[in-house]
Image (tube, rainbow, N blue to C red):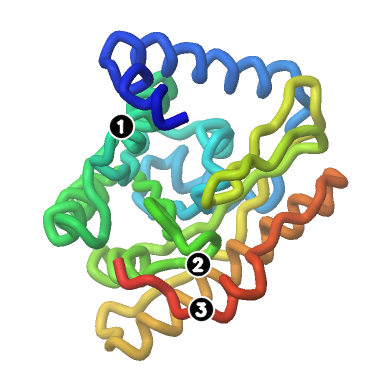
Amino acid sequence: MRALRPIVRHPKVQTILCWLIAQYIRFVYWTGKWTLVGEAGPVALAVARKPFILAFWHGRLLMIPYSLPGRGTVSMLISSHPDGQLIARTVLHFDIVTIAGSTSKGGASAIRNLVRVLRNDGIVGITPDGPRGPRMRASEGVAALARIADLPVYPVTFSASRGVVMGSWDRFFLPFPFARGIFVWGDPVYVPKDADAAVIATKRQEIEAELNAITEQADKLVGAREVKPAPSELDSAPVER
């Protein structure tokens, strides 16, 4: 696999590869039977062109472009790492623009750019366990952004009755065509403008717990194998990003 990386990262190869991935996502969606659960709140905000933050696990990223009917353009925080840019060029096919960075490297600049989008009534998407994990463990970056922007965080996930869990760090879930699929939205998490470090830490835990709960719910609703963090991951301290 390492020998293939220089080829995959070549700009022309990436252009073709990202187009193919986008077509696969469309094929999975249009051949499947997809339903939405708990979407009323975020869909109402999206239709009214009001800002909010949506959060989803890195391993449940693939079908998220179809999780929010009626939306306009979404801005998504993506790592500037070459592998992150593969994702960035793929989601462009779904009217999702990207902001390079993370809440670790260049974090302050990325947060400023995200806040700017939100204050212009945009929607921002974040993978709280990206770009390198631990899997299904939220960093405090999303809660900190919610505090600064004074906007809710809506957790969202997806699952499908047919698919495969990849062997990557995030246990990336790849759904298959002609499956029963589901998008599940969780309850919004609000972070007070005057929240101190202790409150932000608590809100981080709320976001993480809600994301894990709806992921388990989504898997059960379509009869998929449940994908949970390993016990060692649950017991480990979250990475500061």
Give amino acid for label 2.
Arg
Q: Position of residue 208 (x, y in %)?
A: 53, 69
Pick whichever of labels 2 and 1 is earlier in the sequence.
Answer: 1
Left or right for 150, reference 217: left
Label at residue 137: 2
Q: Residues within 10 Å of mark 2 (few under 14, many from 20)?
A: many
Give amino acid for label 1.
Gln
Task: Identify the residue shown where x is 45% and y is 34%.
Answer: 71
Q: Position of residue 102 (x, y in %)?
A: 26, 54
Task: Identify the residue shown where x is 43% and y is 74%.
Answer: 238
Residue receiving disc 3: 236
Dots 3 and 1: beta carbons under 8 Å? Answer: no
Task: Mark yes or no: residue 221 visible.
Answer: yes
Give amino acid for label 3.
Ser
Q: CA distance from mark 3 to mark 1?
A: 29 Å
In which quadrant of the rendered view does residue 106 lie? bottom left
Residue receiving disc 1: 85
Task: Identify the residue shown where x is 26% and y is 51%.
Answer: 118
Left or right for 119, reference 229: left
Task: Mark yes or no: residue 95 visible.
Answer: no
Q: CA distance from mark 2 to mark 1?
A: 22 Å
Task: Identify the residue shown where x is 69% and y is 62%.
Answer: 228
Between 237 and 65, the one nearer to me in the picture? 237
Q: Quadrant of the C terminus?
A: bottom left
Q: Position of residue 48 (x, y in %)?
A: 42, 42
Pick whichever of labels 2 and 3 is earlier in the sequence.
Answer: 2
Element under label 3?
A: loop
Element under label 1?
A: helix
Asked if 231 appears above or below 135 in the picture, the reply is below
